[in-house]
Image (tube, rainbow, N blue to C red):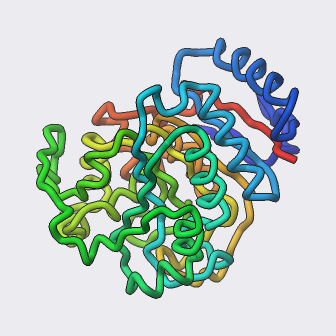
Amino acid sequence: MKTLPLCPESSTRRGFVKMGTAGTTLAMAASATEVLAAENSGPDVWMLHGSDPRKLMQKALDIIQENGGFGPDAKTLALKVNAAWGRTPEEGANTHPDLVDVFIEGVKKGGIKTVVVPENPCSNAKISFDRSGIERVVKSHKCKMIDLKRKDKSFREVQIPKGKNLKSAEVAGEFLDADVVVNMPVAKHHKGSTLSMAMKNWMGIVKDRRFWHQNDLPQCIADFSSFFQATWTIIDATRCMMDSGPQGPAKELKHPDLLIISRDQVAADSVASAIFHDSPYDITYLKYAEEMGIGVVDQSRMNIHKIEVS
């Protein structure tokens, strides 16, 4: 299957809609969205391209608000970033802190009272949370970044009815109990699962990752995603490790300058995978997800909205 080109200057069926992030441009974005949504009834995926991560996230918040937001009664939000590694923002192993900063500020202004950022890191939390730059911005908004390694009582066992290999998991209660869950991973190479994006990012909310690695990691990723999904997925593809993942440092670091947004985590991962591979079907866990019927992989069945953010 041929995927859509990612570069804004490429000749595509839809192309990027050029616009800013405020004022009358919001009406333009809404109009463009309505036109594109009429093309088919599949999931919407927004690709935002621009060199400023802060402007990209502001536009992402605008799009979320225009497309149902978080619901009228939402008061608590659990944000799943990738802050697993003791790497700097420039190295691309973790979610960019500027995205987290603008996101938390925006959702709190929009009425969310409590935002928590729990993570079960791979590196020592004191190192990874600090070097990633994420803990600093979380604290600046008087929110909590939680080291799940130190909160054993947070985890609760859940059953995964559709799971083939992964039948149950111990999941952090902060995510199970929140009114809203937002998944904000970074897109990068991963030696065990080919890529790490939205679906793979859920490994940071479970207690036992060893079982996943020992029992067909791609299938376990798909299994867990059949049980758990975010209200919104926002994939950080502002800079991407093309090798040496998940920790790096990478030999090759690309700068696609993209945010990819959707309610369908499988669709979001499919679109993001085009940065790295010719076809999303090169990613085994995406093939499994389609076989299990938990999301859309075929990009011809999606409404892909490309927006240039200046």
Front residue (pair 234, 246): 234
Residue at 23% over, 71% down: 151
Give residue 285's position: percent from left, percent from top: 36, 51
Q: Position of residue 301 (x, y in %)?
A: 54, 24
In-front residue for pair 151/303: 151
- Identify the residue at image location x=16%, y=56%: 169
Q: Nearer the viewer, residue 264 or 250?
A: 264
In the rendered view, would you say 278 is above or below 241? above
In this rendering, is residue 188 above or below 179?
A: below
Indicate the quadrant containing the N terminus: top left, top right, bottom left or bottom right.
top right
Point 62% across, 67% down: residue: 97
Which quarter of the picture shows residue 159?
top left
Horizontal side of 284 relative to 299 (left or right) equals left
Across and down, in percent, residue 284 comes to 38, 52
How many labels sit on residues? 0
Q: Is residue 206 left or right of residue 178?
A: left
Residue 195 visible (yes or no): no
From where the camera sits, is residue 247 visible? Answer: yes
Residue found farthest to the top: 38
> Is 6 drawn above or below residue 275 in the view shown?
above
Residue 103, given in percent of the width and then of the height, sits at 60, 52
272 horizontally vs 154: left or right: right
Q: Residue at x 35, y 56 (%)?
A: 202
Is 26 or 144 nearer to us in this picture?
Answer: 144
